[in-house]
Image (tube, coloured by chain):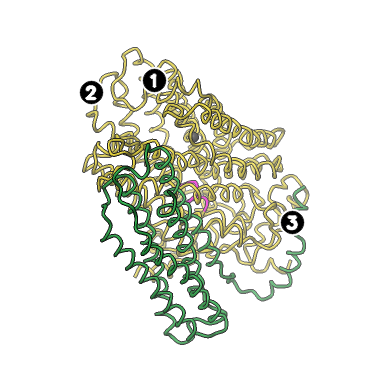
Amino acid sequence: MQGSAIDSQAVVNYQAEVGHGHHGHPDYRVLGVIVFLIAEAMIFLGLFTAYLTFRAVAPTWPPEGTPELELLLPGVNTIILIGSSFVIHNADVAVKKNDVKGLQKWFGITAAMGAVFLVGQLYEYFHLEFGLKTNLFASTFYVLTGFHGLHVLFGLVLILGVLWRSLKPGHYSSSNHFGVEAAEIYWHFVDVVWIVLFILLYLLK
Amino acid sequence: MTQTLQEEATNTPAHGATEGKREWLKYISFSTDHKVIGIQYLVTSFIFYLVGGFLATLVRTELATPQSDFVSPDLYNGLFTVHATVMIFLWIVPAATGAFGNYLIPLLIGARDMAFPKLNAVAFWMIPPGGILLMSSFFFGAPGSGWTSYPPLSLVYNKVGEAIWILSVLILGTSSILGAVNFIVTILKMRAPGMVLNSMPLFCWAMLAASCLILLGTPVLAGALILLGFDLIVGTAFFNPTGGGDPVVYQHMFWFYSHPAVYIMILPVFGLISEILPVHSRKPIFGYKAIAYSSFAISFLGLIVWAHHMFTSGTPPWLRMFFMINTMIIAVPTGIKVFSWLATIWGGKLRLNSAMLFAMGFISMFVIGGISGVMVAAVPFDIHVHDTYFIVAHLHYVLFGGSVFGLYAGIYHWFPKMSGRMMNETLGRVHFILTLVGFNLCFLPMHKLGLEGMNRRIAEYDPKFATLNLVCSIGAYLLAVSTFPFIFNALWSIFKGEKAPSNPWGGLTFEWQTTSPPPHENFAIDPMLLIAPYEYGTEKAKEIIQAGPFLATAAATEA
Ligand SMILES: [Cu+2]
């Protein structure tokens, strides 16, 4: 019954390969990063659902006396972050052509855009008329954007780390660029989370 | 420093002449060998099991009499809270997934190690600090709101201990997530040639299903604990009704993880049982695909039943019906497994050794917990027994009668492989009988106590419950005593036990085709699937078992 479950083609392929006798295995790190990001996504999903439940249960939302949120600065910030996702993709294209200079240029621009986003967010924090403990909306606002901001910061550190390593000649090439891919995937993830966050906190009335 | 020690140590053959005294050092080093890590998990979690058991003994001592006369009520709250946290996060989860997952998966699928060995070591080394942190809470007023830590109680009671509890569970949860990433990638990508999903050993299916639950559930718990931490430390009001927050949201987030957590603790053990039964029954497993796929059915359903813990938390009636029906449906895939196991041992040439006794004890005890599980899934019944000893009885039949019996079965079954020595069978049987009797003496009467209305998590109770409680406490002491023959057996066998052959039980899976213990990187030649894992009793199986460990020596390639 289960004998049929054995893939005979794979056995044949294996027998052809076994002569090489090396014990390494292909690089699964990118898959590992993606699987890990599923867990990350679940934290945000949990926090978003909590936020939506607070909204649904509260008699008025946002609670009375919450000042209106200014849209201009976070709007610009959103455009910067979404734009950076396109910029970082160029780096991936560059490294696949063995163009390390291009990689450095595009990663440098992405890092700058990420830094601008973080500074913009801090600026917003200091100019908001409510604090962490003002009311339930304020608390969720700061915790959600803050938790996301930490992820942007971590993404920025990853990008700078890749930049630092790329200074060593030959560290990244078209065949060996896990760090570049990991940083890019992570950056896209942070970007998508921000879009959902922006809709939930700023646009949803 | 440790790095070099480890490299030296892992490169020494396990039983070489130059073995020396440094061999044991690798078990306290940052080793990246999955076998070392598996044993590190097993020993660490077993030590925490003893700690949790000690706390349980203190709880039962307090409950031996109706008065609160042994410890202060405050300390009592800390004892049962930390007992549950230790048993769940530091014993069953790390033992079932970390220990057996890490030790067995690469061996079962014919890989030389896990996909990410360093990440694996990092995940393990988060366990001891997380555990010690939790234990340290006793110096600051232990967390006393139960392992569920429901706000608003948890926000006002023993706050320092509570903060330590949150931090510790966050650390242990992160470790569990990192482990799950490793298991998923390893099982999906590193199987030996010829092994498709439908020909991998059933433990791998179970671990895949459990890892998915860890990946989807644990982060939501982390989210809940982050918010709880803000409420506790900063003074926000996410879960605090006085500030406009909603404690029920915490309950939803908590149980979104903690119901699946039951399956994180039981699915890997289901997998162990599916490996052990066919070997000691000398029969092919009955219903391979049914057992394999039912793990995923359980995982999926397990994600949509959480509010059955909240039938008395103001959950609307229509929603209660949804969660009640889903919960009852889980009995179907679980029943499929149980009947497949029974059909596997039916008419087999049973070997009633310690591993098999514990495996069969597992089935019988787990079924009792499963049946009381369907009972408490029914809304009207649950409203009656909510927060009573009936729940305590139910959960211990699942987590002790199920998980712990299964873990013991696993230890007896794979001890020869892990240590290269056989365990003593007589002591094993004594251990089994003491455990079975002690367990039932301790937990069976709790069903009746609960039905009669004795509340859980209280140090003082109505004197009319005194007799049965005394019986429970005697059972608990017997359970405590039952671990001594096991500990003695394990320690004695490691040093003085009879040398184990590579395949003491006549198993067909890859781990039995290499030496005991397996060498560094597991196999002398690259494994290839010759026979599906459970074809016991066939001519081909007999040939393979008689030929000896075909993966142990390079010469075997030529044959
Ligand atoms: Cu449940």
Residue B419 is inside the magenta segment? no
What amino acid is at disc 1? Answer: Val
**Residue B45: horizontal and vertical position, in percent?**
41, 47
**Residue B150: horizontal and vertical position, in percent?**
35, 36
Q: Colour of chain B?
A: yellow
The image quarter containing residue B137 is top left
Q: Is mark 1 within 8 Å of ligand 1?
A: no
Query: To which chain does the residue with label 2 belong?
Result: B
**Residue B17: horizontal and vertical position, in percent?**
48, 66
What amino acid is at disc 2? Answer: Asp
User: Are tags 3 and 2 found on a single chain?
Assistant: no
Which is closer to the viewer, label 1 or label 3?
Answer: 3
Q: Nearer the viewer, residue B448 or A183?
A: A183
What amino acid is at disc 3? Answer: Ile
Query: To which chain does the residue with label 1 belong?
Result: B
Residue at left offset 43%, top offset 22% = B446
Residue B335: in sight, yes or no? yes
Residue at left offset 32%, top offset 24% = B63
Q: Is residue B6 above or below residue B273?
A: below
Badge 1: few (under 14), some or many (20 or more) residues near its Cα, within 10 Å?
A: some
Any mark on residue A6, and which? Answer: 3
Residue bounds of the magenta highlight: B95-101
State the SS at label 1: helix
State the SS at label 3: loop
The residue pinned by badge 2 equals B69
Q: Is residue B398 above or below residue A198?
A: above
Q: CA distance from mark 2 to mark 1?
A: 18 Å
The image quarter containing residue B548 is bottom right
